[in-house]
Amino acid sequence: MPRWPGDPAVEFEGWADIGRDGYYLRRFSMGEHAGTHLTAPASFYSGGRTVDGYAAGELVRAAVVIDVRGQCRGNGDYALTVADLLAWESRYGDVPGGCVVLLLTGWGELWDDPARYLGLDDRGKLHFPGFGAEAAGVLMNGRGVAGLGTDTAGVEPGVDEGFAVSRLVLARPRIVLENLANLERLPATGAVVVVGVLGLSGGSGGPAGVTAFVP
């Protein structure tokens, strides 16, 4: 599966065998940010909240979906703009406080092609869409949302090597969800997401099973 450059590989090791031990067991290892995952503030802030610090109630949220697939076609560096946000609100109403805003870029369709999903170029730069910093600021400060999620490898575009949007969200601290799937199956409003995260003690993040309930 797509893996952020430099992150640990997913590895499996045989541990017990039915013929030898009477049962079958493997050991596996992976990075805390592999696959669909929640990123915790400790990723960017020394002493920040770790993934085991989220209460269950914080991880059940109303969700809205902003569809920018049209803008992202042919533009792997697209960043959600304030104009995009206002256009969405003119159709669906104000983004409600306390929700999670999910960005549908269409990048989930590229999951089985890691090179295209990450957009890694010959200079080692990544190219995938995300939230623009200005739009993210409006959502966090103006709308009071609980967090951001996306169907790409990062909530900010891949070309943003400073992780500006992640830092903005996690300074609160709130929720960052990445590598989400099936966002195209959700309505623009009305869904509720439940984040079942692997609450690793002291974790910078953790693999998550994210379930959406739709009306």
Image (cartoon, grey):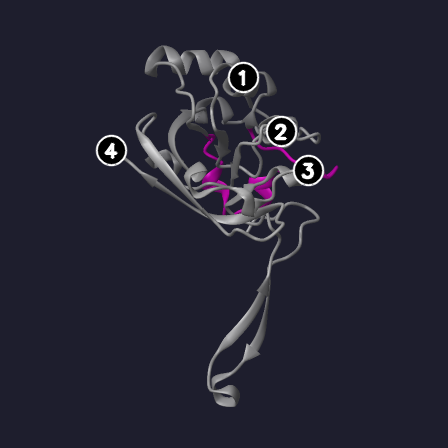
Q: Which residue is drawn at 47% across and 30% down?
A: 105
Q: Mark 2 points at which residue?
A: 171
**Which disc is residue 88 wearing?**
none
Mark 2 falls on what kind of element?
loop
The residue nearer to you, when weighing 214 against 125, is 214
Mark nearer the N terminus (2 vs 4): 2
- Mark 2 and 1 residues: CB-CB less than 8 Å, in contact? no
Q: Residue at x 53, y 21 (%)?
A: 140
Residue 113 in view of the camera: yes
The residue nearer to you, when weighing 94 against 84, is 94
Magenta-span inclusion, residue 47:
no
The Cα atoms of the two marked residues, 2 and 3, are separated by 30 Å
Q: What residue type is labelled 3?
A: Asp
**Which disc is residue 215 wearing?**
4
Location of the C terminus (image quadrant): top left
Q: Give the range drawn in magenta.
A: 103-129
- Mark 2 and 3 residues: CB-CB less than 8 Å, in contact? no
Q: Which residue lies furthest to the left in this view?
A: 215
**Which disc is residue 121 wearing?**
3
Image x and y of residue 130, in percent = 55, 28
Q: Which amino acid does label 1 sit on?
A: Asn
Instruction: Please indicate whether residue 137 sits to the left or right of residue 145 in the image.
Output: right
The Cα atoms of the two marked residues, 2 and 4, are separated by 32 Å
Q: Which amino acid does label 4 sit on?
A: Pro
Mark nearer the N terminus (2 vs 1): 1
Q: Name the residue under label 1.
A: 141
Nearest to viewer (mark 4 / mark 1): 1
Residue 75 in view of the camera: no
Q: What residue type is labelled 2?
A: Ala
Q: How crowded is mark 3: few (under 14 residues within 10 Å), some or many (20 or more)?
A: few
Q: How crowded is mark 1: few (under 14 residues within 10 Å), some or many (20 or more)?
A: few
Q: Residue at x 52, y 89 (%)?
A: 20
